[in-house]
Amino acid sequence: MVFYECVMTAKNTTHFHQLTNIVKGISHKIVEGGGIVRSIRNHGIRDLPHRFKAKYADNEGIRYYKKGRFISVYYDASPQTMKQVERELSLEEHILRNTHLKARSKLDTINAMNERKNPYIQRVLAMEAEAEQGSEK
Protein backbone atom coordinates (compact mmCIF):
# COMPACT_ATOMS: atom_id res chain seq x y z
CA MET A 1 0.00 0.00 0.00
CA VAL A 2 1.26 3.42 -0.97
CA PHE A 3 0.10 6.69 0.60
CA TYR A 4 -1.22 8.98 -2.17
CA GLU A 5 -2.53 12.52 -2.32
CA CYS A 6 -4.91 13.27 -5.17
CA VAL A 7 -5.40 16.98 -5.87
CA MET A 8 -8.36 17.72 -8.13
CA THR A 9 -9.28 21.01 -9.73
CA ALA A 10 -13.00 21.15 -10.49
CA LYS A 11 -15.04 23.77 -12.31
CA ASN A 12 -16.13 26.51 -9.95
CA THR A 13 -19.68 26.25 -11.36
CA THR A 14 -20.04 22.58 -10.39
CA HIS A 15 -22.79 21.93 -7.85
CA PHE A 16 -21.99 20.51 -4.43
CA HIS A 17 -24.01 17.33 -5.07
CA GLN A 18 -22.04 16.58 -8.24
CA LEU A 19 -18.72 17.03 -6.42
CA THR A 20 -19.97 14.83 -3.59
CA ASN A 21 -20.89 12.09 -6.06
CA ILE A 22 -17.46 12.32 -7.72
CA VAL A 23 -15.63 12.02 -4.38
CA LYS A 24 -17.91 9.17 -3.27
CA GLY A 25 -17.22 7.31 -6.52
CA ILE A 26 -13.48 7.72 -6.06
CA SER A 27 -13.73 6.59 -2.43
CA HIS A 28 -15.70 3.48 -3.42
CA LYS A 29 -13.07 2.62 -6.06
CA ILE A 30 -10.31 2.92 -3.45
CA VAL A 31 -12.13 0.80 -0.87
CA GLU A 32 -13.08 -1.85 -3.48
CA GLY A 33 -9.40 -2.02 -4.44
CA GLY A 34 -8.44 -2.77 -0.83
CA GLY A 35 -7.36 0.77 0.03
CA ILE A 36 -8.19 3.18 2.83
CA VAL A 37 -9.38 6.78 2.41
CA ARG A 38 -7.57 8.77 5.10
CA SER A 39 -8.90 12.28 4.53
CA ILE A 40 -10.80 14.51 2.12
CA ARG A 41 -10.22 18.27 2.09
CA ASN A 42 -12.08 20.98 0.24
CA HIS A 43 -9.71 23.91 -0.27
CA GLY A 44 -12.45 26.11 -1.73
CA ILE A 45 -12.61 28.21 -4.87
CA ARG A 46 -9.32 29.84 -5.80
CA ASP A 47 -7.86 31.70 -8.75
CA LEU A 48 -6.09 29.44 -11.23
CA PRO A 49 -2.50 30.24 -12.28
CA HIS A 50 -3.73 30.54 -15.88
CA ARG A 51 -7.04 29.86 -17.55
CA PHE A 52 -7.92 26.18 -17.80
CA LYS A 53 -9.76 24.73 -20.76
CA ALA A 54 -12.48 22.19 -20.06
CA LYS A 55 -12.97 19.18 -22.34
CA TYR A 56 -16.49 20.28 -23.19
CA ALA A 57 -18.43 23.50 -22.83
CA ASP A 58 -20.98 23.42 -20.01
CA ASN A 59 -24.70 24.31 -20.25
CA GLU A 60 -23.96 28.05 -20.33
CA GLY A 61 -21.36 27.59 -23.07
CA ILE A 62 -18.39 28.30 -20.78
CA ARG A 63 -15.25 26.38 -21.73
CA TYR A 64 -12.46 28.45 -20.18
CA TYR A 65 -12.13 28.91 -16.42
CA LYS A 66 -10.12 31.43 -14.39
CA LYS A 67 -11.30 30.03 -11.03
CA GLY A 68 -11.52 26.47 -9.79
CA ARG A 69 -12.42 24.45 -6.72
CA PHE A 70 -9.49 22.50 -5.25
CA ILE A 71 -10.15 19.20 -3.47
CA SER A 72 -7.55 16.84 -1.95
CA VAL A 73 -8.11 13.16 -1.23
CA TYR A 74 -5.52 11.34 0.89
CA TYR A 75 -5.58 7.56 0.66
CA ASP A 76 -3.58 4.34 0.92
CA ALA A 77 -3.93 2.03 -2.08
CA SER A 78 -2.08 -0.11 -4.56
CA PRO A 79 -0.67 1.45 -7.75
CA GLN A 80 -3.32 -0.38 -9.80
CA THR A 81 -6.09 1.26 -7.76
CA MET A 82 -4.44 4.65 -8.23
CA LYS A 83 -4.50 4.12 -12.01
CA GLN A 84 -8.23 3.29 -11.82
CA VAL A 85 -8.88 6.48 -9.85
CA GLU A 86 -6.91 8.52 -12.42
CA ARG A 87 -8.88 6.91 -15.24
CA GLU A 88 -12.20 7.68 -13.56
CA LEU A 89 -11.18 11.31 -12.96
CA SER A 90 -10.05 11.74 -16.56
CA LEU A 91 -13.52 10.69 -17.75
CA GLU A 92 -15.28 13.11 -15.39
CA GLU A 93 -16.34 16.30 -17.19
CA HIS A 94 -16.49 18.47 -14.05
CA ILE A 95 -12.81 17.88 -13.21
CA LEU A 96 -10.45 20.23 -15.05
CA ARG A 97 -7.16 18.76 -13.79
CA ASN A 98 -6.00 16.10 -11.35
CA THR A 99 -2.61 15.25 -9.94
CA HIS A 100 -1.51 12.25 -7.91
CA LEU A 101 1.41 12.64 -5.54
CA LYS A 102 3.09 10.00 -3.49
CA ALA A 103 2.61 11.67 -0.12
CA ARG A 104 5.15 11.34 2.65
CA SER A 105 3.94 10.55 6.11
CA LYS A 106 5.78 11.13 9.38
CA LEU A 107 6.35 7.39 9.66
CA ASP A 108 8.49 7.39 6.50
CA THR A 109 11.43 8.60 8.60
CA ILE A 110 11.35 5.37 10.57
CA ASN A 111 13.38 2.84 8.65
CA ALA A 112 13.41 -0.46 10.50
CA MET A 113 15.41 -2.19 7.77
CA ASN A 114 18.59 -0.14 8.30
CA GLU A 115 19.30 0.15 12.03
CA ARG A 116 22.41 2.29 11.60
CA LYS A 117 20.47 5.15 9.97
CA ASN A 118 17.42 5.05 12.22
CA PRO A 119 17.73 7.39 15.23
CA TYR A 120 14.82 5.76 17.05
CA ILE A 121 16.33 2.28 16.88
CA GLN A 122 19.72 3.71 17.87
CA ARG A 123 18.14 5.26 20.96
CA VAL A 124 16.44 1.97 21.93
CA LEU A 125 19.66 0.00 21.40
CA ALA A 126 21.58 2.50 23.56
CA MET A 127 18.98 2.21 26.32
CA GLU A 128 19.19 -1.61 26.15
CA ALA A 129 22.98 -1.47 26.33
CA GLU A 130 22.81 0.81 29.39
CA ALA A 131 20.30 -1.53 31.05
CA GLU A 132 22.58 -4.54 30.44
CA GLN A 133 25.59 -2.71 31.88
CA GLY A 134 23.54 -1.65 34.91
CA SER A 135 22.40 -5.26 35.55
CA GLU A 136 25.97 -6.63 35.29
CA LYS A 137 27.23 -4.37 38.11
Image (tube, grey):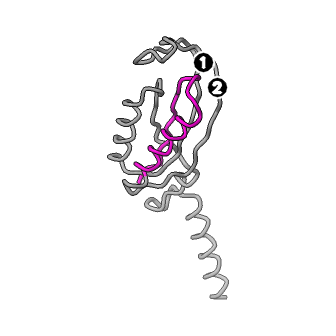
Looking at the image, residue 31 sits to the left or right of residue 106; the answer is left
Local SS, label 1: strand
Does 88 appear above or below 112?
A: above
Look at label 2 and name its amino acid: Ile
Q: Are marks 1 and 2 in contact (CB under 8 Å)?
A: yes
Q: Residue at x 45, y 17 (%)?
A: 54
Q: Quadrant of the C terminus?
A: bottom right
Which residue position holds label 1?
Answer: 67
The residue nearer to you, when weighing 94 against 100, is: 94
In the rendered image, residue 4 lying in the magenta stretch gets the answer yes
Residue neighbourhood size for the residue with mark 2, other residues' Cα within 10 Å, grouped as few (<14), some (14–19), many (≥20): some
Q: Secondary structure at mark 2?
A: strand
Q: Position of residue 125 (x, y in %)?
A: 57, 70
Q: Is residue 77 left or right of residue 122?
A: left
Label 1 Cα neighbours within 10 Å, binned few <14 / some 14-19 / many ≥20: some
Q: Which residues are magenta?
A: 1-30
Residue 26 in the image: above or below residue 19: below
| Most distant residue in the left direction | 80
- Which amino acid does the dot numbered 1 rest on? Lys
Is residue 80 part of the magenta span, yes or no?
no
Mark drawn on residue 45 = 2
